[in-house]
Structures are given as structure tokens and as C-alpha cells.
Image (tube, rainbow, N blue to C red):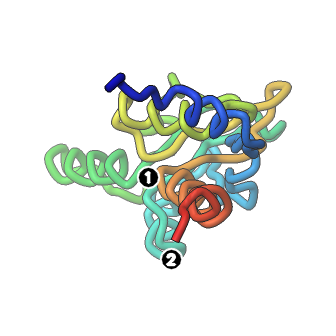
């Protein structure tokens, strides 16, 4: 008796046409953005009203200049109490993260998933030609995986 090789079946399976799942196909394009000259108090209100955890900061040309999160706002709140400074006066540009890592819209969602795992971030902005065009979140990647399951994985299962 010889050892059976399953290599043939794998090759056949790999040749099945698979739809490339790109970040741009699952990114959110209708974004809530903030201005560097906006007050942190307004960001807190928007975070609560829209049930978001933060958002990109763009200038008047829609160029990404930072990201502000609820954590950045909490830090400001804590420091304002400690230094007895009013929350309403601080500006986004003083609290935002300026060195923002982005993802290419053409990146495969599986590569994006790995980038999320390695960076511990919840979202990445997508910039094209210097302009903010969208944002991808961990939840967007999970939605893509569910769609892949319904399109490809189920068709490979034999019942």
C-alpha cells in the first residue's frame, strides 16, 4: 500500500476562480471627520451621538492630518481636571495622533486582517492622491469574511 497524496486535489481547488477581496470594496466612504481647529468638546458630542470610537482629522483640502479617538478625549478630560483647565477650550490639533498609519485600498483583506492583528488598531484610513477616501475597520474585515464564506466556502462543501 502506498501513501496517497492529496496534492492533486489542492491544486484543483486552488485553480477555482476566487474573487479577490480588496480593502476598497469593504471600506467605509461615508465618514464622520473632524477638523484640527474643532474643539475637543465637539468631538466628544459627535462620538456619543454617532456611536463611533473616533475618526480621521482632515484639513480644508480633505487631506488626512491625524486621527482622534475617544481615548484621546478621555486623556484630555483627565488632564483638564488635574490642571483645572476647562474641557471646552482644547482643540483637536492638540489631542489628535499626527503620525497616522494608513492602508492601501488595493490591499487584500487577508493582508489587512494581519495588519490589524500586528498593530492592535481598530481602524485604518485609506488615502489616495493625498486625499482621504475611506476607512477600514476590523468589523469591515469581518463582514468581508462572512461574504466570502457565503460565496466560496459553502460552494466547496459537499453535503
Question: Would you say 75 lies left or right of 94 here?
Answer: left
Give the crowd class for mark 2: few <14, some 14-19, many >=20 residues within 10 Å: few
Residue 117, image x and y in percent?
A: 37, 35
Figure quadrant of the N terminus: top left
Q: Of the residues tagged 2 and 1, which is closer to the observer?
A: 2
Question: Would you say 118 lies left or right of 158 here?
Answer: left
Q: Nearer the viewer, residue 3 or 143?
A: 3
Residue at position x 54%, y 37% in the image? 110
Residue furthest toward the front?
Answer: 1
Q: Which residue is mark 2?
A: 49
- Whether the residues at callouts 2 and 1 have beta carbons within 8 Å, the answer is no
Q: Nearer the viewer, residue 78 or 3?
A: 3
Image vertical order of residue 48 relative to residue 101, above or below = below
Q: Nearer the viewer, residue 149 or 70?
A: 149
Residue 45, image x and y in percent?
A: 48, 70
Q: CA distance from mark 2 to mark 1?
A: 20 Å
Q: Which residue is mark 1?
A: 89
Residue at position x 56%, y 33% in the image? 10
Residue at position x 35%, y 57% in the image? 87
Residue 92, image x and y in percent?
A: 51, 44
Residue 91, image x and y in percent?
A: 50, 45
Q: Which mark is residue 48?
A: none
Q: Which numbered disc flags the more N-terminal residue, 2 or 1?
A: 2
- Element class at badge 2: helix
- Element class at badge 1: helix
Residue furthest toward the bottom?
Answer: 49
Amino acid at each position: 500500500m502506498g501513501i496517497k497524496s492529496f496534492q492533486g486535489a489542492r491544486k484543483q481547488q486552488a485553480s477555482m476562480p476566487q474573487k479577490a477581496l480588496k480593502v476598497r470594496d469593504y471600506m467605509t466612504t461615508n465618514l464622520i471627520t473632524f477638523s484640527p481647529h474643532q474643539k475637543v468638546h465637539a468631538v466628544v458630542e459627535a462620538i456619543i451621538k454617532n456611536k463611533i470610537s473616533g475618526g480621521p482629522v482632515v484639513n480644508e483640502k480633505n487631506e488626512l492630518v491625524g486621527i482622534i479617538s475617544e481615548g484621546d478625549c478621555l486623556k484630555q478630560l483627565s488632564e483638564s481636571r488635574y490642571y483645572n483647565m476647562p474641557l471646552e477650550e482644547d482643540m483637536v490639533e492638540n489631542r489628535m495622533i499626527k503620525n497616522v498609519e494608513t492602508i492601501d485600498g488595493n490591499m487584500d483583506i487577508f493582508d489587512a486582517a494581519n495588519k490589524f492583528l500586528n498593530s492592535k488598531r481598530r481602524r485604518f484610513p485609506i488615502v489616495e492622491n493625498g486625499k482621504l477616501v475611506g476607512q477600514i475597520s476590523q468589523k469591515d474585515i469581518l463582514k468581508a469574511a462572512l461574504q466570502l464564506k457565503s460565496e466560496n466556502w459553502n460552494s466547496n462543501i459537499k453535503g
